[in-house]
Image: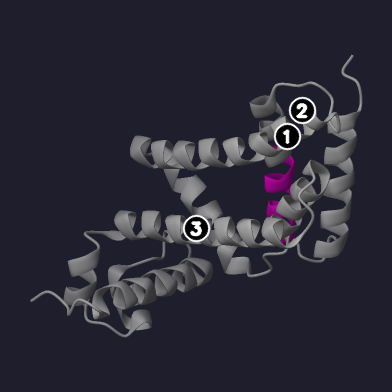
Amino acid sequence: MSPKRGVAPLRRAAIVRATIRCLARDGYSGLTMKKVARDAGVSQGILHYYFADKRAILVAALEAVAADLDRRVAAAQSRGPKDPRARLLALIEAWLAVEERAFWIVFVEFWGEMMHDRQLRETNAVLYERTRRLIGAVVVQGVRAGTFRRTDPLRAAAVILGLVDGVSLQLTFDPSAFSVADATRFCGDAVLRYLTREAR
């Protein structure tokens, strides 16, 4: 029997949140449908109504944390000044200010699995392309305004994304290495230097 119309999205969201908690605690190798069902407070039959297997639920968890990141970035950029430097710094800060370790563990677990799964790699590629285009649009705005040097916006976006990804992973693996505030500051400084210096 299918769930009532208003219950379905709430129940699905609860299952995805439970999956994120299970991934953070047990990793993908330790993830089971039984554990997720128990953590979400639903039967395994209900769980299988929404997700066919643990691979499908992993994709849903990735999509959930990516959507949450998109919301954080949009909110940060809407609050501050609209000039390209401020928009880019707000974007970096929104990414790095996610202090929930479980959030980044979802990415790490997904990346580990996608190395052996073409469809997961394609899902990741779509996500990364969208993110590079988001960053690239800000770079284009800065180049047109004369704030940033002339550069290929998507290549610049790939460099910026690589920097923020790498720092986010360090914060996940070793939170004592540096603070989020320090990470935000040195990432912002590095990105602005990269975009304002003349290429050789």
Classify mark 2: helix, strand or loop: helix
The residue lying at 39 percent from left, 42 percent from top is 120
Q: Which residue in the rendered view is the most extreme toward the bottom? A: 41
Disc 2 target residue: 144
Q: In this view, does 113 lie above or below 70?
A: above
**Does the magenta run of residues contain 169?**
yes
Spatial CA distance of label 1 from label 3 is 24 Å
Residue drawn 80% across the image and 45% down it: 83
Say if mark 1 contacts mark 2, CB within 8 Å: yes
Residue 192 colored magenta? no
- Real-space Cα separation, disc 1 to disc 2, in angstroms: 5 Å
Q: Give the range drawn in magenta.
A: 162-171
Pointer 1: what residue?
A: 141
Task: Estimate the x, y position of residue 45 in percent, counting from the top left.
Answer: 16, 75
**Upstream in sequence: badge 1 or badge 3:** 3
Residue 153 visible: yes
Q: Nearer the viewer, mark 2 or mark 3?
A: 2
Main secondary-structure element of the magenta-colored stretch: helix
Question: Disc 2 marks which amino acid?
Answer: Arg
The outermost residue toward the top is 200
Q: Which mark is drawn over residue 67?
A: 3
Q: In this view, does 143 lie to the left or right of 126?
A: right
> Which residue, as the protein is rendered here, is positioned at the far left?
1
Q: Position of residue 97 (x, y in %)?
A: 72, 64
